[in-house]
Amino acid sequence: MFLGVLITGIPLSLVLGALLYFPFFLWKRKLHLSALRHLTVYALICFTILVFDATLLIGGINFMPPYYFLNLAPFEWLRHPYEMGMERMASQLVLNILMFVPFGLLLPMVFPRLRACWKTLLAALGITVLIEVLQYFTGRSADIDDVIMNVLGAVMGYGLFALLNKALQSRKWWQNMLGAQLPASLRK
């Protein structure tokens, strides 16, 4: 699956991200946003597409699966390792954490209203619950452990954002990346 994401998912997300970002670019071009700000928003769009591709599209969608798998017992994998084995299950959990680190970092960078930690985590929780619900109805498993690990990844990403913001808040390029508005005298 990871190789499939690298081979098909990344190019797909870059192209589809550019198509989705272009209207935003046209809409905001009069504000003279910095290239770093454009890059940050584009990165969030591409990453969101990549996550939805990896969690929903790669491997196919089956709206009439032979069975539905739903795990609502947290950390059930510790008591009863899944058929894939403990090592593969651990790698899946780590990948679920790593997959949401960029959300924790990029969401507060792109959306100033999400700069409070709890708001970023609530947004990440909403995204991961949406993914798990869609997975359940498209022939994949839905697992509360995935939600927990995704939110843990978002916590780590937000921690990275908070550290970077504290260290770089006085830097002009960082402010531009976060979308600080230009003074009226510099706008055309």
Image (spheres, rainbow, N blue to C red):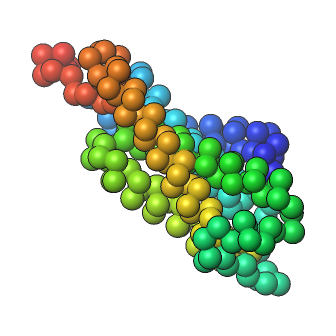
Residue 162 in the image: state x and y as whole percent. 37, 34
Residue 47 in the image: state x and y as whole percent. 57, 43
Q: Is residue 140 left or right of residue 154?
A: right
Residue 35 in the image: state x and y as whole percent. 41, 21
Residue 127 in the image: state x and y as whole percent. 50, 59
Q: Is residue 31 left or right of residue 48?
A: left
Give the image quarter of residue 46.
top right
Q: Is residue 41 visible?
A: no
Q: Residue furthest front?
A: 79
Give the image quarter of residue 141.
bottom right
Q: Is residue 57 visible?
A: yes
- The one of 178 and 78 positioned closer to us in this rendering: 78
Q: Which residue shows up at 52% across the image and 52% down it?
A: 152
Give the image quarter of residue 146.
bottom right
Q: Residue furthest left?
A: 185
Q: Which residue shows up at 73% across the image and 78% down it?
A: 69
Q: Is residue 16 left or right of residue 172?
A: right
- Up/down of 93 relative to 20, above or below: below
- The one of 64 and 107 positioned closer to us in this rendering: 107
Q: Is residue 137 left or right of residue 163?
A: right
- Up/down of 165 relative to 145, above or below: above
Q: Which residue shows up at 78% across the image and 72% down it?
A: 80
Task: Classify the position of the C terminus by image quarter.
Answer: top left
- The one of 43 and 33 positioned closer to us in this rendering: 43
Q: Which residue shows up at 15% across the image and 21% down it?
A: 183
